[in-house]
Amino acid sequence: MAELEIRAYRDADEPALMALWARVFPDPAPRNDPLLDARRRASTPDRELFLVALVDERIVGSAMGGYDGHRGWVYRLAVEPERRRQGIAAALMQRLEAELAAFGCPKLNLQVMGSNTAVIGFYRALGYREEDRVSMGKVLPSAPGGVDPGD
């Protein structure tokens, strides 16, 4: 594999990132508009927690992180399907963990669909463990698409 570069997202990355996310996350819930998600994340002061992975100057992966002062979170870890199992996702996670640690973040959380056993295995291999928690959510009335009972 050519040399992997991981860097902060730039506005010029938007078209390539949208193409990647369309392949990796093909059926987002109405309230999870990928373009809006990227633009909102890019507009925050800690935008260095929004990462892209490049090979030969082409975006092949991404990860968004967040830190609220209590816990860090990982969102939209994505790697092109044909580039999986090449260490790209692990490199993105390592960089994101380092960036969050620099903020003083003591713990990182993420959510995975229970049926996505391959991804659960990936995170276990990185040292993440399932915790005895109940994930809860509420779609707000202002969300695009209105109330969505699933997802």
Image (cartoon, rainbow, N blue to C red):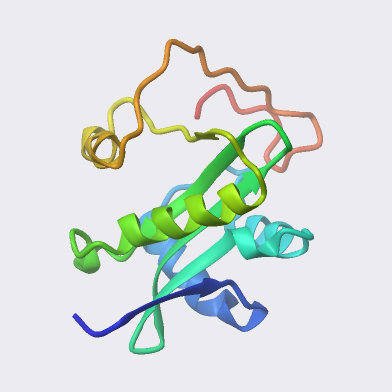
In the displayed structure, 102 sits above or below 140; it is below
**Direction from residue 18 to residue 147 in the image, left or right:** right
Image spot of residue 25 (x, y percent): 42, 52
**Direction from residue 144 to residue 60 in the image, left or right:** left
Image spot of residue 149 (x, y percent): 57, 22
Q: Nearer the viewer, residue 42 or 8?
A: 8
Image spot of residue 75 (x, y percent): 52, 46
Image spot of residue 10 (x, y percent): 63, 77
Would you identify the image quadrant in which residue 22 lies?
bottom left
Q: Nearer the viewer, residue 92 or 137?
A: 92
Q: Residue at x 58, y 35 (%)?
A: 106
In the displayed structure, 20 sits above or below 69; it is below
Q: Residue at x 46, y 63 (%)?
A: 62
Question: Residue farthest to the bottom?
Answer: 56
Q: Residue at x 23, y 39 (%)?
A: 125
Pick the quarter of the image with the N terminus.
bottom left
